[in-house]
């Protein structure tokens, strides 16, 4: 169980953790691999969300998922970029969270996932929570904990070194 004070301070900052959907780079499941290749190369993110026409989250796509289709025996073949669409290569087993999300659960999930898509009850994509934003929250707590709380070590601080 996470410490109540830490949980409270994280919750105070919770809204800052989520990058809203309208500023998250994404592609449509119907886009060609060529389009997704260009977007991923341009934005430089390792993986981005895939949405349907109604903004529902359908999966995630990365450059390796795309370039894997181009591998020939000893050469690259770019034809699949126009023959396949994002839906054909995206990963669909995606760990998602609902808003408002449980901070402790988010901390656990971010151990294995660099970001977590946030979806509403009907599956609509509303944004992402990234390790980077949560790290900022932890940094904030590290700098502000003793401004709002009295922290008394159970052992001498010298012994903590
Ligand atoms: P960060 O913790 O900021 O390094 O982000 C971790 C991952 O989240 C990135 O590698 C991307 O896959 C994804 N990500 C972060 N910000 C965005 C964004 N604005 N649009 C799309 N994906 C993002």
Image (cartoon, rainbow, N blue to C red):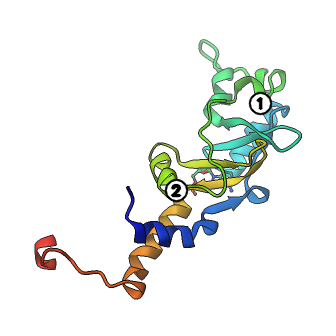
Crowding near the residue tagged with mark 1, few <14, some 14–19, many ≥20 C-alpha atoms within 10 Å: many
Q: Position of residue 98 (x, y in %)?
A: 65, 50
Above or below, comparing residue 30 to residue 75 in the picture:
below
- Of residues 109 and 4, the one nearer the viewer is 4
Tag 2's secondary structure? helix
Q: Nearer the viewer, mark 2 or mark 1?
A: 2
Residue placed most toward the observer, 157 or 85: 157
Q: x and y percent of residue 131 in the render? A: 52, 56
Q: Is residue 84 left or right of residue 147?
A: right
Q: Residue furthest top?
A: 73
Quarter placement of the N terminus: bottom left
Residue farthest to the bottom, as pictured: 147
Q: Is residue 161 visible?
A: no
Estimate the spatial distance between the alpha carbons at disc 2 and disc 1, rounded to whole Å: 25 Å
Placement of the C terminus among the 4 image quadrants: bottom left
Q: Is residue 17 visible?
A: yes
Q: Which residue is mark 2?
A: 131
Q: Is residue 60 left or right of residue 153?
A: right
Q: Which residue is mark 1?
A: 86
Name the residue located 68 percent from the left edge and 21 percent from the top edge: 69
| Label 1: which secondary element | helix
Q: Residue at x 54, y 55 (%)?
A: 102
Residue in the foreground of this view, choosing between 131 and 10? 10
Q: Is mark 2 within 8 Å of ligand 1?
A: yes
Q: Quadrant of residue 100?
A: bottom right
């Amino acid at each position: 169980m996470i410490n109540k004070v830490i949980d409270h301070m994280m919750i105070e900052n919770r809204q800052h953790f989520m990058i809203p959907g309208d500023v998250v780079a994404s592609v449509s499941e119907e886009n060609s691999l060529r389009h997704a290749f260009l977007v991923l190369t341009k934005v430089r993110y390792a993986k981005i969300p895939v949405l349907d026409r109604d903004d529902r989250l359908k999966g995630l796509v990365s450059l390796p998922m795309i370039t894997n289709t181009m591998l020939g025996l000893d050469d690259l073949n770019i034809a699949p970029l126009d023959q396949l669409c994002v839906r054909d290569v995206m990963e669909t087993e995606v760990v998602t969270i609902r808003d408002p999300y449980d901070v402790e659960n988010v901390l656990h999930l971010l151990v294995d996932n660099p970001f977590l898509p946030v979806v509403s009850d009907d599956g609509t994509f509303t944004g992402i929570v990234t390790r980077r934003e949560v790290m900022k929250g932890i940094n904030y707590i590290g700098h502000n904990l003793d401004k709002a709380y009295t922290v008394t070590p159970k052992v001498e601080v010298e012994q903590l070194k």
